[in-house]
Image: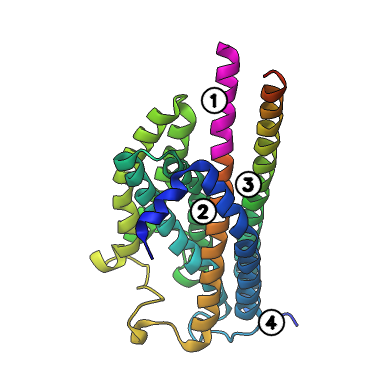
């Protein structure tokens, strides 16, 4: 299944590895912050409602 | 389509409602396009007669480089909208896009260097395109640092918008450096409206799918991160009101 990459295998695999890792970190960090900020806003809004 | 209708999305609530509806679909399309494009390119395309298997790096390098430049151009447009019409959502969208663009620039620089070592015999050269790309990356860092350094949101949006206008020179230089100066190592564009200049079809079609995947991923991330910036801004406003009252 793995294609024959020859003498450039290291270059090709490291390119894919570095890029996919960076994209995954970016997506993970964006989702994590999105959840955290959304929760924080919901808490503050519900507290503001409670306090009138 | 009535372009004036677009201004409705300058309303933060409306923006969040609209993007909430489309975000799951764009995300799914992005994942599908990226998986199909990268698997097609990596497993099912032949070696190039000159570049060998390093040609497979094209499926990451070209889309990321394209997005690095276009992310900045998107930031330019939204910054101009902020300067002219003072819509907060547009300034926050520019802020949201910057880290995505910066990561795309890092990927383009890293994959370019990894490809350059076996092909050019060097990781780096002070070639016009490479150098303008490095400067573009520094502009991304400066842009994000400026947003983080200024507490008042409107002042930060004003100053970062000006920085974005200045940085646009380098975004355009990154794109056209190969055409302006011929002494660099970097080859001409892999994609062009002129079919004669494109890479061979066997590489071209998976490359198009990868580009579509990167564009969709960029849109999804910018929507998500803009929503986050809108909510963070509202949180700061509510906390400030609470402290005062």
Chain letter for mark 4, please.
Answer: A
Specify whether disc 1 shares its chain with disc 2: yes
Residue named by callout 3:
A30
Q: Are marks 1 and 4 in contact (CB under 8 Å)?
A: no
Image position of B151 with respect to B67: above or below: above
3D distance between C-alphas at marks 2 and 3: 17 Å
Assess whether residue B233 is covered by the magenta stretch: yes
Q: Residues within 10 Å of mark 3 (few under 14, many from 20)?
A: some
In-front residue for pair B106/B15? B15
**Stretch in magenta:** B230-245
Identity of the residue furthest to the right in this view: A1
3D distance between C-alphas at marks 3 and 1: 22 Å
Chain letter for mark 3, please.
Answer: A
Name the side, left or right, on which B194 lies relative to B138.
left
Chain letter for mark 2, please.
Answer: B
Residue B12 on image: x %, y %:
51, 42
Residue named by callout 4:
A3
Q: Are marks 3 and 1 in contact (CB under 8 Å)?
A: no
Residue B50 on image: x %, y %:
48, 83
The mark found on residue B157 in the picture is none
Residue located 30% across and 67% down the image: B178
Q: Nearer the viewer, mark 2 or mark 3?
A: 3
Residue named by callout 1:
B237
The mark found on residue B106 in the picture is 2
Q: Nearer the viewer, mark 4 or mark 3?
A: 3
In-front residue for pair B33/A9? B33
Image position of B62 with respect to B161: above or below: below
Residue located 24% across and 64% down the image: B180
Image position of A25 with respect to B115: above or below: above
In-front residue for pair A46/A28? A46
């Amino acid at each position: 299944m793995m294609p024959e990459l020859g003498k450039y295998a290291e270059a090709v695999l490291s390119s894919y590895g570095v890029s996919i890792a960076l994209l995954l970190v970016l997506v993970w960090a964006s989702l994590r912050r999105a959840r955290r900020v959304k929760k924080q806003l919901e808490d503050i809004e519900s507290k503001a409602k409670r306090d009138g | 389509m009535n372009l004036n209708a677009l201004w409705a999305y300058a309303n933060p609530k409306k923006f969040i409602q609209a993007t909430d509806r489309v975000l799951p679909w764009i995300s799914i399309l992005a994942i599908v396009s990226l998986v199909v494009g990268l698997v097609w390119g990596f497993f099912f395309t032949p070696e190039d007669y000159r570049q060998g298997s390093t040609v497979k790096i094209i499926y990451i390098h070209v889309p990321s480089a394209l997005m690095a430049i276009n992310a900045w151009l998107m930031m330019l447009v939204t910054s101009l909208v902020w300067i002219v019409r003072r819509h907060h959502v547009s300034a926050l969208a520019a802020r949201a896009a910057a880290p995505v663009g910066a990561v795309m620039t890092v990927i383009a620089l890293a994959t370019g260097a990894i490809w350059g070592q076996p092909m050019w015999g060097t990781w780096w050269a002070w070639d016009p395109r490479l150098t303008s790309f490095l400067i573009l990356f520094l502009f991304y860092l400066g842009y994000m640092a400026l947003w983080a350094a200024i507490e008042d949101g409107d002042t930060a949006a004003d100053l970062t918008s000006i920085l974005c206008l200045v940085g646009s020179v380098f975004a355009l230089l990154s794109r056209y450096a190969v055409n302006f100066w011929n002494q660099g190592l970097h080859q001409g564009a892999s994609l062009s409206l002129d079919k004669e200049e494109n890479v061979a079809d066997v590489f071209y079609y998976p490359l198009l799918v990868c580009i579509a995947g990167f564009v969709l991923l960029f849109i999804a991330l910018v929507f998500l991160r803009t929503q986050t910036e809108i909510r963070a801004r509202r949180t700061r406003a509510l906390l400030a009101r609470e402290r005062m009252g």
